[in-house]
Image: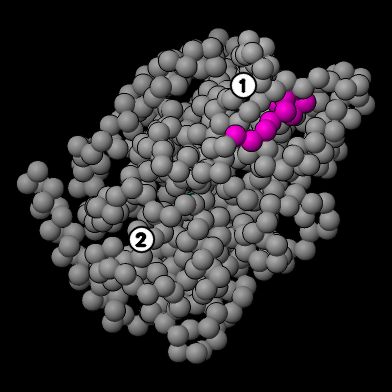
Amino acid sequence: MKLLILAGAVSLLVATLRWIYQRFTRISIRHVRGPPNVSFWLGNLPEYHQNQVGETDFKWMDLYGGIVKYKAPFGEDRLMISDAKALQYIFQTAGYNFPKVPERRELSRIITGRGILYAEADDHKRHRKVMLPGFGGPEAKSFHPIFLRCAEQMSSKWQDIINASPNQASVLNIPPWASRAMLDAIGQAAFDYNFGALDDANNELNKAYSNLLKDTFQVLSRSSAAIFVQNLWAYLPLKVLHFVANHSPAMTMHHARYCERVATDIARDLVKEKADALLEGKGKRDIMSLLVKANASEDPNRQLDEQELYDQMRTIMLAGHETTANTLSWALLELTSHPDMQRRLREEIWEKQRELGGSDIQPADFDSMPYLTAITKEVLRYHPVAPMTQRMAGRDDVLPLAMPIILTTGERVHELPVSKGTKFILSIAGYNRNKDVFGADAQVFNPDRWLGESKASVNVGVYANLLTFSAGIRGCIGFRFAIIELQTFLVELLSKFEFTSTPELSKLRREPCGVMAPTIDGQQDDDAQLPLLVKCIPRID
Ligand code: HEM
């Protein structure tokens, strides 16, 4: 405890010195417009973290534009960015000059270890080189039979529940179902291993991963003290920060550490199994086998140490299942809220099934299903489950701007100098609803926007000019995998079920908790919730 108090006092001192330095340093962002400061201790952060996802981003963008100055604790100036050119510069053009912020990076170390999400600069390059061969287009397509098997397994369980219900319709809470199905899918595709989460909800790995991000990150949206403490972390030397993160008695850390133990044990066994299989010439095509194989190369630029391999597995398990599971939930919500869109998508699926004479729809067929593609893009645009990421300037730099901003001095500028150490919220949710990029109706869920020509002048994201999968040198490595998985599930579910609304949907929240999960107002502390009325639908040939 004494150590924690000392750490707090040192942080406070460093924060004050830093503030004085920032205040009088030559490069200053204090003339950028933004919300008035609310508190010296917390700045504008409670408003940002305690509203629903995107609410504050959209409000600030409307009031101040694509670059907004907001306050962090101790009067520190930071920027929220949704301007296309500035984002492109930070994510792509400037290379590794905008690293992740240490306090957020430390949380990701606890959850996924020193895998690719944690690595920086040359280390990150090495991780990516080893990982990329497992994540190309052909590899993602080759996993389709696995995705289909998991989707069919889930839908057959739903059919059993519905058939056993008196009205032949059941209210199903979608997120935990989606989460278990996606955990099984990632297990089989990435590790050739069946976690069995769909068959047994009490499976240890499923328990370890369920609501992991919610338990770790939701605290920021529930407690201003947690915001303050997490921001103090920023001023601790890295070694002290490691110690604090490893030993913090905070409840939020318990789940992360439990998950680390369970997942690392499984990872250790799997890595050994893959390495033995490779030695016997029986290597498979799952991502982990490709990783272990790439790792056996003699080139040190392509090697990960043993712990990094385990951590990579934890990274893939986390990054690859909560994200797709929540995206599927948001997709089903939109299709439920827009019955016309649900009918139109189902018609397209049935039409394709008729055309194929009963054979399964393959990933190659998805490309010739314009409405499925449009729905996929619009769901990803409107509901980016990782709604923001944070970076800091690694050196004094100048951000180019797609749209000029007016400073508080009245000056209009087309680029913005920032000093080393300035921190940014890169607003994925904000960019995806940027009117300069997606048009005046950017705030409306409208899949039809994707059926016309694309007019983007600055291309930012890795898919459809969306920022949902981030962009540039750290863009999501699993985006092709995610899209094929989502489309496989949508085709399976829409062709067999009809989804209608329940009264709880009027109280639905976009909960900020690591990933954006649906919850019900007043029950935010419970697990993710999206109760939908589901009914089997007879095939009309
Ligand atoms: C809808 C689904 C998904 C979304 C919205 C999503 C989003 C993202 C975002 C925003 C990042 C950047 C994080 C940051 O830099 O702060 C990221 C990185 C990453 N994602 Fe995804 N992701 C999805 C699915 C997947 C899947 C299915 C996998 C693996 C099978 C995956 C693996 C990764 C990995 C390994 C990284 C780290 C890349 C790097 O740092 O170089 N993701 N993802």
The magenta segment: 492-502
SS at badge 2: helix
Q: At 18% from the left edge and 59% from the top edge, which residue is drawn?
A: 11
The residue nearer to you, when weighing 27 against 442, is 442
Residue 39 seen: yes
Q: Is mark 2 in CB contact (under 8 Å) with mark 1? A: no
Q: Position of residue 176 (x, y in %)?
A: 51, 27
Quarter of the figure with residue 441: bottom right
Res 262 quadrant in image? top left
Query: Which dot marks residue 45?
Result: 2
Asked if residue 329 lies in the magenta stretch, the reply is no
In-image side of 76 versus 10 (left or right)? right
Give the answer, above or below, for where 45 lies relative to 300: below
Residue 325 visible somewhere in the drawing: no
Furthest residue in direction left, as rendered? 2
Q: Residues within 10 Å of mark 2 (few under 14, many from 20)?
A: many
Name the residue located 79 percent from the left edge and 59 percent from the top edge: 454
Q: Quadrant of ligand 1?
A: top right
Closest to the observer, 217 or 461: 217
Mark found first going from the N terminus, 2 or 1: 2
Q: Which residue is mark 1?
A: 170
Q: Residue at x 57, y 40 (%)?
A: 505
Q: Horizontal and vertical percent for residue 300?
A: 47, 37
In the rendered image, the vertical position of residue 164 relative to residue 379, given as above or below:
above
Relative to 520, 419 lies left or right: left
Crowding near the residue tagged with mark 1, few <14, some 14–19, many ≥20 C-alpha atoms within 10 Å: many
- Residue lying furthest bottom: 410
